[in-house]
C-alpha cells in the first residue's frame, strides 16, 4: 500500500501545530531553535530527530571553533558545555609510502591554524545543546523521521509528515502499524545534514540551485580509539596529505587527541574520485598502517566507527536557502569550510541567522513567505567572509595535488601576509560527483592489503562498533529506480562501485547456483552516510527515510 492508500484507510493523520518546525537535532537545527526562543520566548518550536536521541547520528572530526557557540550561549563554559580540551598544537604532515615530512610551523597556512579551538565529541556537544533548547521550552521529538514535505494550496511549505511505523517488507501494515503524523508550522527549518533527503527534494522543487555550481561532497570515515597513556598528547591536532591518495584524488587524514587517553581519527575522500576500483573504507584502513599514524594508536583499542558524507562547502555551490514557508540551514544547505575541515561553527551560525529572521517575521504575524532577511544577514556575516576566503580550496585540488598544495599556500599563507584577505579570483565547478567515474577498463585496479585485526579491520566488524540497527521487517530504505541497472550498467561498465564506496557493506554482488549476478542490499547495515545517493554513477539509488530511531547510535563520536 502507498502512503495515500494508508491515509485513506487508517487516516486522517494526527496533526500538531507549532510556530516553527525544525527537522534535525544537529548543531544547526538546535541553534535555530535556541536562538528563536531567546528572541521570541512565547514561540512554539518543535525539533524532530530521526536518531534515537540527539547526537545519535552525529559524526564529525571534530575540532570546533567556539566563535558561533559563544555568540549563541556566551556562558557556555559556566553551563558545562563539553568543550573541554583546547588545541595544544598542530602538525601538518605530508606522507609518502614509507615516511613523512612535517610542515614547519611558520609555513602552515591560516586554514590549518587551530589556536583557540577545541577537540570535542560533537555528539556530546549536540546532546548538551539539546538540553539547553529544552530548558528554553523547545520540544524535541527523537526517533521521528521526517519522511514527507507538506505543501499548502499556494505551494508553500506548511510542515512535514513523519514516516509510518510498523510497515512490513511487503509494504503492508503489520500488527504494530502506526500512521505518521503531521507537524505543521508557520515556517519549517530543514537541518538534516549533508544531502538531506527532504532538502534534496526542496532544492529540485523550487530550483534553489539555479545559477549555482553543482554541490560537491566527500565521505568522511572515522574511528575512536583508546590509546596507551604513554602515547597520549591531549589537544594535539594532526592533518595529513599525500599517501595513500594518488595525485588525481582529493583526500587526507586527521588525528585528534582528546582527553582521557582518547584519539579520534579518520580519512576524508572527495566523492569526485575517478577510479571505480577505489574503496574509501580500505584507503582509511591502510592509511592507519603508516608509521606516522600507527605511532599514535599502536597498542590501543578501537572503540567506535562511523561514516558520513560531508559538503565541500564552496559558496559558489550554495543554493538559495529560502523558499515559501521554509529555509535550509547547516549542511542541508552546504555551509561548511572544507579548507578548515570545520562545519559545526558554520552550522550553528547559519541556524542563528535563520532564527534571527524568523523572530521578527513571527512577531509581525507573517507565515509561509520567504525569509529574505536570512540570506541577507548571511551576506553581511563573518561566516560569509570566511567561506569566501576559502572558496577555491577544493577546486584547486581538482587540478591535481601539486597545484592544490601550491595554490592553497598562495591563498591561505602568502596573500594574508600581503594584506589580501580573500583571493581576487573565483574558480567554478561544472561536473557532479557521480559523473566523475571512469569505466573500469580505463582505470587501474587497486590491491588492498588484508586487515590485520590490530590496526586495520574489515567492514562488518566496523559496522558492529557503530551500534547500527534497523527494524528487520521494514521495507528497505535504499531503493532502486530500476532494478536491472546495477548489473546491466554499474557492474558491467564500472565493476560495481557500490560494493566499494559504501563504508558499511550494504551493497554486494552475489551469484547463486551458477546464475547471473545480482545486487544484494543489506539495508540493516546502513549508517545513513548518503554516499550511495551521491556517488551512484547512474543515480539509480535513492535513499529514503527508514523508520525513526533506526541507524547508528554513536557514542563519543
Image: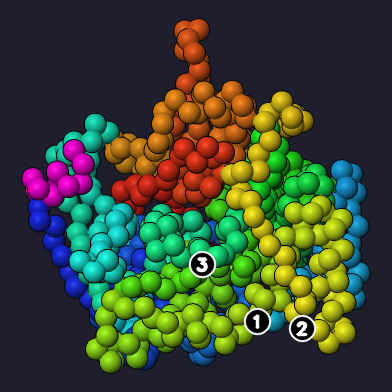
**Mark 2 or 1, nearer chain start:** 1
x, y (%) of residue 178?
17, 49
**Picture disc at residue 8:** none
* Element type at mark 2: loop
**Residue at 46%, 72% in the rendered image:** 321
Percent coordinates x, y for residue 353 in the rendering: 47, 83
First in sequence: mark 3 vs mark 2? 3
Of residues 263 and 319, the one nearer the viewer is 319
Residue 305 lies, with reference to residue 1, above or below; the image says: below
**Residue 443, quarter of the rendered image:** top right
Q: Range of the magenta residues?
A: 1-10
Contact between labelled residues 1 and 2, with CB atoms less than 8 Å apart: yes
Instruction: Give the Cα distance between marks 1 and 3.
Output: 17 Å
Can see residue 481? yes
Q: Tell whether 16 sits left or right of 146.
A: left
Place of residue 14 in the rendered image (x, y in percent of width and height, measured from the top left): 13, 61
Question: What residue would you read off at disc 1?
Answer: 385
Q: Is residue 146 above or below residue 517?
A: below
Amino acid at each position: 500500500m502507498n502512503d495515500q492508500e494508508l491515509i485513506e484507510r487508517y487516516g486522517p493523520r494526527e496533526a500538531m501545530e507549532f510556530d516553527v518546525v525544525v527537522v534535525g537535532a544537529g548543531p544547526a537545527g538546535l541553534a535555530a531553535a535556541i536562538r528563536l526562543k531567546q528572541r521570541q520566548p512565547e514561540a512554539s518550536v518543535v525539533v524532530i530527530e530521526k536518531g534515537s536521541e540527539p547526537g545519535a547520528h552525529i559524526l564529525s572530526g571534530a575540532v570546533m571553533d567556539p566563535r558561533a557557540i559563544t555568540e549563541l550561549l556566551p556562558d557556555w563554559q559556566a553551563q558545562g558545555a563539553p568543550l573541554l580540551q583546547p588545541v595544544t598544537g598542530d602538525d601538518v604532515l605530508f606522507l609518502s609510502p614509507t615516511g613523512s615530512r612535517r610542515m614547519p610551523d611558520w609555513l602552515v597556512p591560516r586554514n590549518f591554524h587551530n589556536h583557540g579551538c577545541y577537540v570535542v565529541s560533537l555528539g556530546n556537544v549536540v546532546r548538551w545543546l539539546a538540553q539547553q533548547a529544552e530548558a528554553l521550552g523547545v520540544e524535541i521529538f527523537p526517533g521521528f523521521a521526517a519522511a514527507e514535505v507538506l505543501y499548502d494550496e499556494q505551494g508553500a511549505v506548511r510542515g512535514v509528515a513523519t514516516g509510518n511505523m510498523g510497515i512490513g517488507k511487503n509494504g503492508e501494515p503489520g500488527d504494530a502499524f502506526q500512521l505518521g503524523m503531521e507537524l505543521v508550522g508557520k515556517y519549517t527549518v530543514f537541518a538534516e545534514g549533508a544531502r538531506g533527503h527532504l532538502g534534496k527534494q526542496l532544492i529540485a522543487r523550487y530550483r534553489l540551485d539555479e545559477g549555482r555550481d553543482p554541490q560537491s561532497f566527500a565521505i568522511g570515515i572515522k574511528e575512536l580509539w583508546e590509546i596507551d597513556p604513554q602515547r597520549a598528547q591531549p589537544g594535539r591536532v594532526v592533518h595529513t596529505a599525500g599517501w595513500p591518495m594518488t595525485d588525481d584524488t582529493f583526500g587526507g587524514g586527521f588525528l585528534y587527541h582528546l582527553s582521557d587517553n582518547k584519539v579520534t581519527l579518520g580519512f576524508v575522500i572527495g566523492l569526485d574520485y575517478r577510479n571505480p576500483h577505489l574503496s574509501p573504507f580500505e584507503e582509511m584502513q591502510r592509511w592507519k598502517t603508516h608509521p606516522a599514524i600507527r605511532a599514535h594508536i599502536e597498542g590501543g583499542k578501537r572503540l567506535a566507527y562511523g561514516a558520513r558524507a560531508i559538503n565541500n562547502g564552496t559558496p559558489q555551490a550554495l543554493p538559495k536557502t529560502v523558499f515559501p514557508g521554509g529555509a535550509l540551514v547547516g549542511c542541508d544547505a552546504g555551509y561548511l569550510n572544507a579548507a578548515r575541515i570545520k562545519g559545526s561553527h558554520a552550522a550553528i551560525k547559519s541556524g542563528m541567522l535563520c532564527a534571527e529572521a524568523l523572530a521578527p517575521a513571527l512577531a509581525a504575524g507573517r507565515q509561509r513567505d520567504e525569509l529574505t532577511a536570512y540570506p541577507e544577514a548571511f551576506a553581511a556575516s563573518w561566516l560569509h567572509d570566511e567561506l569566501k576566503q576559502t572558496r577555491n580550496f577544493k577546486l584547486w585540488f581538482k587540478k591535481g595535488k601539486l597545484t592544490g598544495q601550491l595554490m592553497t599556500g598562495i591563498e591561505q599563507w602568502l596573500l594574508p601576509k600581503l594584506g589580501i584577505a580573500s583571493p581576487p579570483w573565483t574558480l567554478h565547478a561544472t561536473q557532479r560527483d557521480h559523473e566523475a567515474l571512469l569505466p573500469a577498463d580505463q582505470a587501474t585496479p587497486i590491491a588492498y592489503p588484508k586487515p590485520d585485526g590490530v590496526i586495520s579491520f574489515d567492514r562488518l566488524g566496523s559496522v558492529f562498533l557503530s551500534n547500527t540497527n534497523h527494524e528487520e521487517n521494514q521495507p528497505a530504505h535504499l531503493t532502486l529506480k530500476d532494478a536491472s541497472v546495477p548489473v546491466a550498467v554499474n557492474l558491467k561498465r564500472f565493476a560495481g562501485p557500490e560494493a566499494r564506496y559504501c563504508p558499511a557493506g550494504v551493497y554486494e554482488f552475489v551469484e547463486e547456483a551458477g546464475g547471473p549476478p545480482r545486487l544484494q542490499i543489506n539495508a540493516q547495515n546502513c549508517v545513513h552516510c548518503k554516499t550511495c545517493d551521491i556517488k551512484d554513477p547512474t543515480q539509480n539509488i535513492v535513499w529514503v527515510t527508514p523508520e525513526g530511531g533506526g541507524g547508528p547510535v554513536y557514542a563519543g563520536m
